[in-house]
């Protein structure tokens, strides 16, 4: 018999205090005070009850780099962070550029059973940016891929990008571009600016990101295809996207939690925990990203969860891998930077971290509000409770969190996926 849960005393994203009952995988009742008889009660007093979170940008490493992460360990990290659906990037070994690989990842996600794992297919074979991958076969596979990305690499050839945009239209799919002009960033280590010049690390200019954003927006508009810009980091990129949206162009964009908070000043420590692609930018960029997320210029928050084995991060900066963990701390960082700063409210965050990412990915069973009959995908967070991040206690197999030792506001108390309790704080 399926267990029944009553989330008691919480506040919905719209500010209404309501109990929420879940049974048989769906939300069965929503009301002020519900009868708890026969239910396992989850105390949500002082907490916000959100639709289950959806991440469009996750690196799970499996197949090929299971020492850093597996689909199972990444699913555990996702559930701990309040996520019920994650999107597995294609830069695995082998690359997810065939139906066989995406179906393997999809099957592993089903076996883990903690979140929905939606594979992202590579745009080009081997992520080499030359020949298109088997997009049609991946779209028609059991995984039903609807997002294609060479993330980690930019599809820098405009002709290849145009062909990809044209091809995915028939599947109502989207190209998610890693905006990085490779000729402007060869050997780059961090943001190009005052800090890079002072500490002697090769700079990564903002224009390398902005040039690709502008080019691809124009290409997508020309062929009338959907384009999604991964991990926007610059104020200039925000302005280009704002301009495009003002003209009705079909572009969406994401920002990571770490780019909402951290700046390139942290590189002065030479600690490669802060080495990430795209790089941490300036305080001016951070403020522009926050404002863009609040006003909808940037559509969603995506974690870019990038686990790495210890030896690839605890080394000299120039030799270290790019990337940092994100799933388990994402909602706390958003709470800190967007809610506690007064820039936005929980209703908007529910849109940015659930409804809109589900719509972009065409994840039809996700992103729905807390209403009777909707799937039992629910996240409970206490926004005022705090915790100290401990890299030795993360659910991920890797330890490369930039927030180790930091006290963050916002404790995920429970996560429900298809009506099952997949994470409970303290359990």
Image: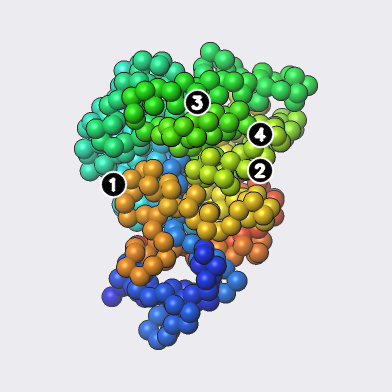
**Vertical placement of residue 135 versus 14, above or below:** above
Residue 341 in view in this figure: yes
Residue at mark 4: 285
Q: Measure how far apart labels 2 and 4 are at the Cα level.
A: 10 Å
Q: Measure how far apart labels 2 and 3 are at the Cα level.
A: 22 Å
Contact flag, marks 1 and 2 (Cβ < 8 Å)? no
Dot 1 alpha-carbon crowd within 10 angstroms: few under 14, some 14 to 19, many 20 or more: some
Q: Nearer the viewer, residue 200 or 400?
A: 200
Dot 4 alpha-carbon crowd within 10 angstroms: few under 14, some 14 to 19, many 20 or more: many
Contact flag, marks 2 and 4 (Cβ < 8 Å)? no
Residue at coordinates 48% horizontally, 62% vertically from top-left?
50
Residue 105, position as x, y percentages in the image: 32, 42
Residue at mark 3: 213
Mark 2 or 3: in front is: 3
Contact flag, marks 2 and 3 (Cβ < 8 Å)? no
Name the residue at the top extreme: 183
Mark 2 or 4: in front is: 4
| Between discs 1 and 3, the one toward the N terminus | 1
Task: Quadrant for residue 419, please give it.
Answer: bottom left
Residue at coordinates 34% horizontally, 63% vertically from top-left?
375
Q: Which mark is residue 261?
A: 2
Contact flag, marks 1 and 3 (Cβ < 8 Å)? no
**Vertical placement of residue 218 versus 397, above or below:** above
| Between discs 4 and 3, the one toward the N terminus | 3
Residue 238, position as x, y percentages in the image: 57, 33
Residue at mark 1: 107
Task: Quadrant for residue 200, please give it.
Answer: top right
| Between discs 1 and 2, the one toward the N terminus | 1
Determine the secondary structure under disc 1: helix
Q: Which mark is residue 129?
A: none
């Amino acid at each position: 018999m399926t267990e029944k849960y009553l989330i008691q005393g919480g506040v919905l994203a719209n500010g209404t205090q309501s109990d929420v009952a879940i049974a048989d995988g769906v939300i069965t009742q929503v009301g002020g005070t519900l009868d708890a008889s026969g239910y396992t009660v989850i105390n949500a007093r002082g907490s916000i009850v959100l639709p289950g979170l959806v991440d469009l940008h996750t690196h799970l490493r499996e197949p090929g780099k299971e020492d850093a992460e597996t689909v199972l360990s990444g699913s555990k990290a996702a559930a701990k962070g309040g996520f019920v659906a994650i999107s597995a990037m294609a830069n695995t070994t082998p690359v997810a550029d065939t139906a066989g690989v995406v179906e393997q990842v999809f099957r592993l996600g089903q076996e883990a059973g903690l979140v929905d794992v939606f594979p992202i297919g590579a745009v080009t074979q081997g992520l080499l940016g030359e020949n298109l991958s088997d997009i049609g076969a991946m779209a028609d596979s059991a995984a039903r891929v609807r997002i294609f990305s060479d993330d980690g690499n930019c599809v820098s050839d405009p002709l290849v990008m145009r062909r990809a945009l044209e091809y995915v239209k028939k599947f109502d799919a989207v190209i998610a571009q890693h905006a990085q002009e490779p000729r402007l960033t060869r050997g780059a280590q961090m943001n190009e600016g005052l800090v890079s010049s002072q500490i002697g690390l090769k700079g990564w200019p903002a224009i390398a990101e902005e040039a690709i954003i502008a080019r691809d927006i124009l290409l997508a508009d020309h062929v009338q295809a959907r384009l999604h810009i991964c991990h926007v980091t610059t104020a200039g990129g925000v302005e280009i996207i704002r301009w495009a949206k003002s003209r009705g162009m079909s572009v969406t964009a994401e920002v990571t939690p770490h780019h909402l908070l951290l700046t390139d000043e942290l590189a002065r420590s030479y600690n490669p925990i802060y080495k990430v692609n795209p790089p941490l930018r300036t305080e001016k960029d951070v403020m522009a990203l926050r404002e863009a997320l609040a006003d909808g210029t940037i559509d969603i928050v995506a974690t870019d969860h990038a686990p790495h084995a210890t030896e690839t991060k605890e080394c000299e900066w120039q030799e270290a891998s790019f990337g940092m963990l994100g799933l388990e701390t994402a909602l706390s960082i958003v709470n800190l930077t967007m809610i506690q700063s007064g820039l936005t409210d929980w209703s908007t965050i529910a849109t940015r971290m659930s409804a809109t990412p589900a719509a972009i990915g065409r994840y039809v069973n996700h992103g729905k509000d807390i209403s009777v009959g909707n799937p039992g995908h629910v996240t409970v967070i206490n926004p005022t409770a705090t915790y100290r991040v401990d890299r030795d206690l993360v659910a991920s197999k890797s330890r490369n969190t930039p927030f180790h030792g930091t006290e963050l506001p916002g404790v995920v108390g429970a996560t429900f996926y298809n009506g099952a309790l997949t994470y409970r704080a303290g359990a």
